[in-house]
Amino acid sequence: MAGRLEGRIAVVVGGSRGIGAATVKVFVKEGAKVMLADIDASMGENLASHFPGRVDFMAADISSRADMQRLAAGAIERHGRIDILAQIAGIYPSHQIEDIPEPEWDQVLDVNLKGAFLAIQACFPAMKRQRYGRIVLTGSITGPIVSQPGYAHYSASKAGLEGLARAAAVEGAVHGITVNVVEPGNVDTENARHVVGDAAMQRMGQATLLGRLALPVEVGDAVAFLASDQAAYVTGQTLVLDGGQTLPEARI
Ligand SMILES: NC(=O)c1ccc[n+]([C@@H]2O[C@H](COP(=O)([O-])OP(=O)(O)OC[C@H]3O[C@@H](n4cnc5c(N)ncnc54)[C@H](O)[C@@H]3O)[C@@H](O)[C@H]2O)c1
């Protein structure tokens, strides 16, 4: 049976590990060819080596306009088109507001929010020419829906993605481009465990209605859905994957 992304050309930014790596694997399983971009070359090249002819790696920093332009040009040179852009790259350092160093604020906004803009800006021309594009941004419930101490910059960046997605969806629609956001709750990635700690991760899983953390592949599946033609009529929307964490009206 043909996959949901059969024959599609996908650019995945931040695909070397965690949710991004899981998304790359789902995309390949669903039939896409992937241009994987990341600042982590060793993990990215290693992942690409498992899928010869299906996944190519390119070292690129999402916060660099030159890198995003080079990435889009590389995908066009290799495959002639860009059907899907998945922006997964993101960072989540933590400091209370009084202690956030200004460079850290700038870096979080540059990677998480400006990076998404730069990736869209780089891929839009090809998608407009083709009159086809599927863009999926990776937000979070942290910012648009909830927040927690230490994540002011992160919250601001992830809330900003919703506005960016709506604006890009409005501009892209007449060109056959859809733009949507996935907003995960807490996802069981190695880096999240490293940053948050195993005990806190366990408590976060227990705080959801489903009683567990999300798996990276579950986010990858949602990204693949929004990148597929099953979601052809969905644009400017957010898809929350939080195991019901933000659903209860009150903690009683
Ligand atoms: N893990 C969670 O609980 C969780 C929850 C909600 C949202 N998210 C979001 O999902 C995304 C992935 O999270 P994760 O836990 O898999 O993180 P991760 O750190 O495991 O993976 C992030 C990837 O992005 C890459 N990256 C970082 N900065 C980059 C840059 N400037 N340019 C290109 N690539 C860069 C990293 O090298 C890495 O491969 C992030 O945007 C994060 O904010 C994660």
Image: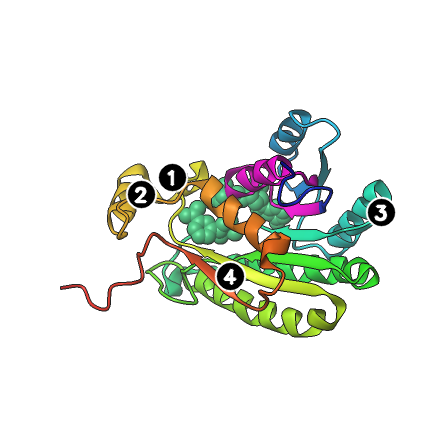
Front-lying residue, 102 or 164: 164
Name the amino acid, label 3.
Gly
User: In the rendered view, how is the structure colored?
Assistant: rainbow
Q: Is residue 162 visible?
A: yes
Q: N-terminal of the two: label 1 or label 3?
A: 3
Q: Which residue is mark 4?
A: 105
Which image quarter holds the C terminus? Answer: bottom left
Q: Of label 4 and label 2, which has the lower sequence position?
A: 4
- Of the image marks 1 and 4, the number of the one nearer the N terminus: 4
Q: Position of residue 246 (x, y in %)?
A: 31, 61
Residue on which disc 3 sits: 80
Q: Give the CA separation, mark 3 to mark 4.
A: 37 Å
Question: Which residue does the numbered mark 1 point to in the structure image?
Answer: 193
Q: Residues within 10 Å of mark 2 (few under 14, many from 20)?
A: many
Residue at x-position 43% and y-position 39%:
189
- The quarter of the displayed image where residue 20 is located: top right
Q: Residue furthest left?
A: 252
Please tell me whether residue 12 belongs to the stretch shown in magenta.
yes
Q: Decide: marks 3, 2 in contact (CB < 8 A)?
A: no
For the point 31% across and 43% down, the residue is 201
Over which residues does the magenta segment extend?
10-34
For the residues labelled 1 and 2, say whether their Cβ atoms are less than 8 Å apart.
yes
Three-letter code, disc 2: Met
User: Mark 2 — residue?
Assistant: 201
Q: Residues within 10 Å of mark 3 (few under 14, many from 20)?
A: few
